[in-house]
Amino acid sequence: MNEIIDFLKEIAPTTISLIVTSIISLSIGIYLEKFKNKLTFLKYKILFHPLATSNNNDYWGNIEVYYNGNKTNHLNFITIYLNNDSNRDFKDLYIDLWVDANSNIQSQNAYYLDSGKPILLEQEHYKGLVNVIEKNKKDLKHRQENPDYITPENLQTEISYYQKNQKYHIPVFNRNSEISLNVLVENSQTNTPKVNIDIKHTGIKLIEEEDKYVMEKRLGVTTIIYGLIVFILVTVFLGIKYPNSLFPIVTIGIVGLLNLFIGLLISKIIQFTRNYLK
């Protein structure tokens, strides 16, 4: 029996060491594999700039909007910012942009914000767009020459597709860089157009960027909460460690908890006094 106990005492440290090492190695391997396959999130932000809207009422009168000589109901200049704030650089990204059924894209451009270098449409999409424009010119000529001429349905479908969809090719998207996509969109219902954007690349997902004010507010609230938790824990620990000093510790703790409110109150009083003395 003693021999068995001595044997276990001798082998136990080595066994435990091997088990712990294996667990650590497995954990590191799982973490690295998860990190390797981790999604990278690129942020985007959409800004709408209404240019003009047709209207007809007794108060404002009749307002008509035209684009290139053609009457329209609503024009909106839309800017989409793409931000790569990750720690990775990317090559050959393809961006899809499309609008709702009641909207049409009239014009577009895109460029890198840091250099101003233009970003072009994806090559096959551009070729298709040029081809449809040429076919539409011929179709328009036929309609002018023959009042009974009807535009083929397949051409109407192609025109509608290119009026509602854009595809961009981004050769390089380095870390800490930003891209601006700009589109001029008309809406037949005098509403703000709905714009959608997507990216085609393994391991990348587009997410909408939060408003900076909301982010800062959330960060401030979170910081305060964590700070208060730490302060309360420290105050409790000191109270237990030094029970004879409980009263001053609790007093300091209460002042610490109320420091933001006290500071805000003093700031308001000073601001009120300054405004009163002006």
Image (tube, rainbow, N blue to C red):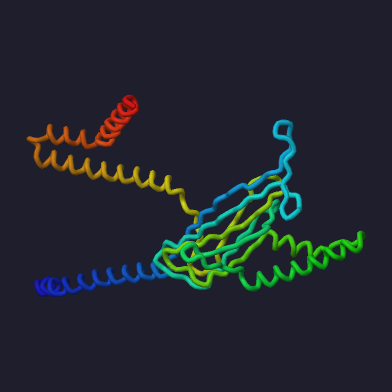
**For residue 128, above or below residue 76:** below
Looking at the picture, tell me which residue is in the foreground, 64 or 9: 64
* Image quadrant in which you'd find residue 166: bottom right
* Image quadrant in which you'd find residue 197: bottom right
| Residue pictured at 66% horizontal, 46% vertical | 52
- Compared across the picture, whether 3 is left or right of 89 comes to left
- Residue 223 location in percent, x, y? 31, 46
Q: Single out the residue that lies furthest toward the top.
A: 276
- Image quarter where the C terminus lies is top left
Give the total number of marks visible in the rendering: 0
- Residue 189 location in percent, x, y? 71, 46
Looking at the picture, tell me which residue is in the foreground, 193 or 146: 146
Looking at the picture, tell me which residue is in the foreground, 266 or 262: 266
- Compared across the picture, whether 149 is left or right of 224 comes to right
- Compared across the picture, whether 117 is left or right of 165 comes to left
- Residue 48 location in percent, x, y? 58, 49
Q: Single out the residue that lies furthest toward the left.
A: 244
| Residue pictured at 73% horizontal, 55% vertical | 68
* Image quadrant in which you'd find residue 120: bottom right
**For residue 131, above or below residue 207:** below
- Image quarter where the N terminus lies is bottom left
